[in-house]
């Protein structure tokens, strides 16, 4: 889709305004730290766990908490732009991420690191949708295709460069430097924003913030994930440490559903959208894609370090094929979706992802590294073909006034799916390790094999909701402006 609009721009012989180009570059520079940070931390997880003497099920909260905080911040960003203006919010987001990075670098135990990562996550969650919203506003809806190619570049490169940079930094300087490097980047980004981004004014009409909805939805998901994580250390679902938080989370979720269906203000998550079968199917798939993607990004560096005994640097290098696979397919998805629709692309992409993940369910320390690299390339190619078609599909059949609500809902669901993915697969590993009385490398291998097999299972199950996607009509395309307003 991006390609179609970009081609249209070329036919009209439009050129990108130098002012817009400058703003685009400044905003992209500001997004570098949050985008690279999340992938760099994945590689450092084993090192951090070793220093703080933490288990996999606990250390995963360094990632899960960050992702959950991002999800909470997404709906707040729209309200905050309306209330304070895009430039102010963008700078505030950078400062919040800066403070979170400084505090994370100074963490003295696993608890403080998790808390400070929450602060980082809120900053990142505010930053990304604010960036794309500002671009659409400043451009007036023109040259979106050109700017999209600029803005999407770090998003495409982060899965490739992040693990490698993380491996180099942790291997040479230590894990705290992953957060130290954010400090100069964010300082420069704030100064560039102050200098190069034009002032904008808050809107006169102040929209209400759904505080009650946020206070219900956030702890509901957090308690559900916490209950899942407790199964590893408490021997299953029958322990009160597991079912008490899980049931409490479900009850709060039920309270949110009742509230969201009856409130007079715009809820943080508009449940009326789910009256559309297509949107419901897309939402399930976005949630599952979060599990498949983020869960794998947690497991893979740990697999290379704990099963194969590789250094953190080598583990980062081994993840390059997956990033390359995502880059190769994702760049073509917009045009292909316009041509044949989302359903066949998502279906084939999920099958490819499962095929690329399956070898890790049988791999051990002696498995050929080239074979695993090829599997990661295939897995990345599959993942790259899932997201953009789903984002296009999400808007099919919705009215214009539903689009902003759909943008928020899809981002929240995919982000929370990512949090669930990290928690569930980390819990599976920890449970497998705890269920074997004897210790040794074979038990570690078996634990990761089972976790990857679960990941394949999640991917296979995702094929079912794909069948309910609406057949995409070429005469009724979703607009790229809507996709960009979603921040993707």
Image (cartoon, rainbow, N blue to C red):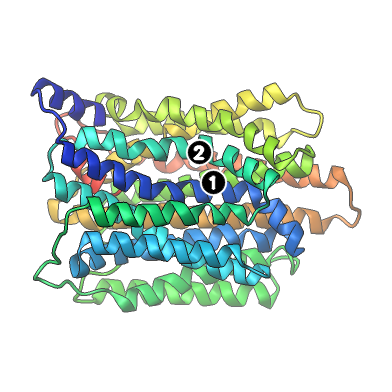
Q: Name the residue under label 1.
A: 39
Place residue 265 in its image quadrant: bottom left
Q: Position of residue 374 (x, y in %)?
A: 62, 23
Q: Which of marks 1 and 2 is nearer the N terminus?
A: 1
- The answer to whether residue 162 is above or below residue 41 is above
Q: Where is residue 257 in the image (x, y as percent from the top left)?
A: 35, 71
Which of the two residues, 227 or 379, is positioned nearer the viewer here?
379
Where, quadrant-wise, is the N terminus in this rendering? top left
Q: In this view, does 177 lie to the left or right of 171?
A: left
SS of the residue at dot 2? helix
Where, quadrant-wise, is the C terminus in this rendering? top left
Please give the name of the residue rendered at 60% of the width and 53% of the height, measured from the top-left corner.
177
- The answer, for residue 97, to whether it is visible in the render is yes
Q: Distance between the residues labelled 1 and 2?
A: 7 Å
For the residues bearing labels 1 and 2, Cβ distance under 8 angstroms: yes
Q: Position of residue 7 (x, y in %)?
A: 18, 23
Q: Name the residue under label 2.
A: 159
Place residue 18 in its image quadrant: top left
């Amino acid at each position: 889709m991006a390609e179609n609009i970009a081609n249209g721009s070329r036919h009209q012989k439009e050129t990108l305004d130098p002012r817009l180009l400058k703003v685009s570059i400044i905003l992209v520079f500001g997004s570098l730290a949050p985008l690279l940070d999340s992938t760099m931390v994945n590689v450092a997880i084993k090192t951090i766990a070793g220093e703080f003497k933490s288990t996999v099920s606990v250390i995963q909260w360094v990632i899960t908490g960050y992702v959950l905080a991002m999800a909470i911040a997404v709906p707040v960003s729209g309200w905050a732009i309306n209330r304070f203006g895009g430039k102010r919010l963008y700078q505030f987001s950078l400062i919040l991420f800066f403070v979170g990075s400084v505090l994370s670098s100074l963490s003295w135990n696993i608890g403080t690191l998790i808390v400070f990562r929450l602060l980082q996550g809120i900053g990142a969650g505010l930053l990304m949708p604010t960036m794309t919203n500002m671009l659409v506003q400043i451009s007036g809806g023109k040259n979106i295709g050109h700017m999209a190619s600029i803005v999407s570049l770090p998003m495409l490169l982060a899965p490739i460069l992040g693990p490698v940079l993380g491996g180099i930094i942790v291997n040479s300087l230590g894990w705290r430097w992953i957060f130290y490097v954010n400090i100069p980047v964010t300082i420069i980004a704030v100064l560039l924003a102050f200098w190069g981004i034009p002032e904008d004014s808050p809107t006169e009409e102040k929209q209400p913030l759904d505080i009650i909805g946020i206070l219900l939805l956030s702890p509901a998901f957090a308690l559900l994930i916490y209950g899942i994580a407790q199964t590893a250390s408490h021997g299953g679902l029958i322990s009160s440490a597991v079912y008490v938080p899980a049931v409490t989370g479900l009850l709060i979720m039920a309270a949110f559903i009742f509230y969201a269906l009856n409130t007079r203000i715009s809820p943080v998550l508009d449940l009326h959208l789910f009256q559309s079968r297509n949107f419901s199917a897309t939402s399930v798939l976005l949630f599952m894609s979060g599990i498949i993607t983020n869960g794998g990004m947690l497991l893979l560096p740990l697999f290379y370090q704990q099963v194969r005994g590789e250094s953190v640097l080598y583990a980062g290098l081994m993840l390059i094929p997956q990033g390359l696979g995502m880059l190769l397919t994702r760049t073509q998805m917009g045009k292909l979706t316009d041509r044949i629709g989302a359903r066949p692309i998502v279906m084939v992409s999920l099958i490819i992802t499962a095929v690329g993940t399956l070898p890790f369910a049988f791999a051990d320390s002696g498995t050929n590294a080239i074979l695993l690299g090829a599997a990661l390339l295939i897995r990345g190619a599959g993942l790259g073909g899932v997201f953009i078609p789903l984002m296009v599909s999400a808007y099919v059949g919705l009215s214009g006034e539903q689009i902003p609500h759909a943008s928020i809902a899809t981002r929240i669901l995919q982000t929370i799916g990512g949090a669930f993915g990290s928690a569930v697969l980390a819990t599976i590993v920890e449970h497998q390790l705890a269920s074997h009385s004897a210790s040794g490398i074979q038990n570690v291998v078996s634990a990761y094999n089972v976790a990857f097999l679960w990941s394949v299972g999640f991917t296979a199950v995702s094929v079912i909701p794909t069948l309910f996607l609406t057949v995409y009509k070429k005469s009724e395309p979703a607009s790229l402006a809507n996709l960009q307003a979603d921040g993707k």
